[in-house]
Image (tube, rainbow, N blue to C red):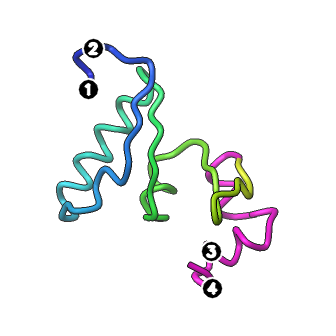
Amino acid sequence: ALALQPQIILMDEPTSALDPIATATIENLLTQLQHEVTIIIVTHNMGQARRISQKSLFMYLGELVESGPTETLFTHPSDPRTASYLSGQVG
């Protein structure tokens, strides 16, 4: 993916079938690459999203519910659906 020097890389669940050591290796690589290329990741792994993203979006049933800086979204979600999902009450 990097050989063509893309401006954006889209990844869908990039570590879903990996063990924790391989996942950490990929997350470290993505953290390094974010300074060179825009990376968009689709994930259901909230821990991973919080660890490696700068901005996050929460979608529910195909609707964009809220977006913003990752830390703000995780600590002070503005929509009750986001709060319910992050707390494990929904999903």
Residue type, numbered disc 3: Tyr
In this figure, what is the number of numbered marks? 4
**Residue 83 versus residue 70 in the image, above or below:** below
**Residue 78 versus residue 89 in the image, above or below:** above
Circle on res. 4: 2
Crowd tier of the residue under label 4, counting other residues whose Cα lies within 10 Å: few below 14, some 14–19, many 20 or above: few
**Residue 66 versus residue 80 in the image, above or below:** above
Q: State the SS at label 4.
A: loop
Q: CA distance from mark 1 to mark 4?
A: 37 Å
**Residue 32 versus residue 21 in the image, above or below:** above
At 42% from the left edge and 58% from the top edge, which residue is drawn? 48
Q: In which quadrant will I find the C terminus?
A: bottom right
Q: Which residue is mark 3?
A: 85
Asked if residue 20 lies left or right of residue 73, the reply is left
Does the magenta portion include 75? yes
Q: Which residue is mark 4?
A: 89
Does the magenta portion include 87? yes
Q: CA distance from mark 2 to mark 3?
A: 37 Å
Confirm or deny contact between disc 1 and disc 2 (CB under 8 A): yes
Image coords of residue 74 (percent x, y): 64, 62
Q: CA distance from mark 1 to mark 3?
A: 32 Å
Q: Which residue is mark 1?
A: 1
Crowd tier of the residue under label 2, counting other residues whose Cα lies within 10 Å: few below 14, some 14–19, many 20 or above: few
Mark 2 vs mark 3: which is more N-terminal?
2
Confirm or deny contact between disc 3 and disc 4 (CB under 8 A): yes
Confirm or deny contact between disc 2 and disc 4 (CB under 8 A): no
Residue type, numbered disc 1: Ala
User: Which image quarter: residue 21?
Assistant: bottom left
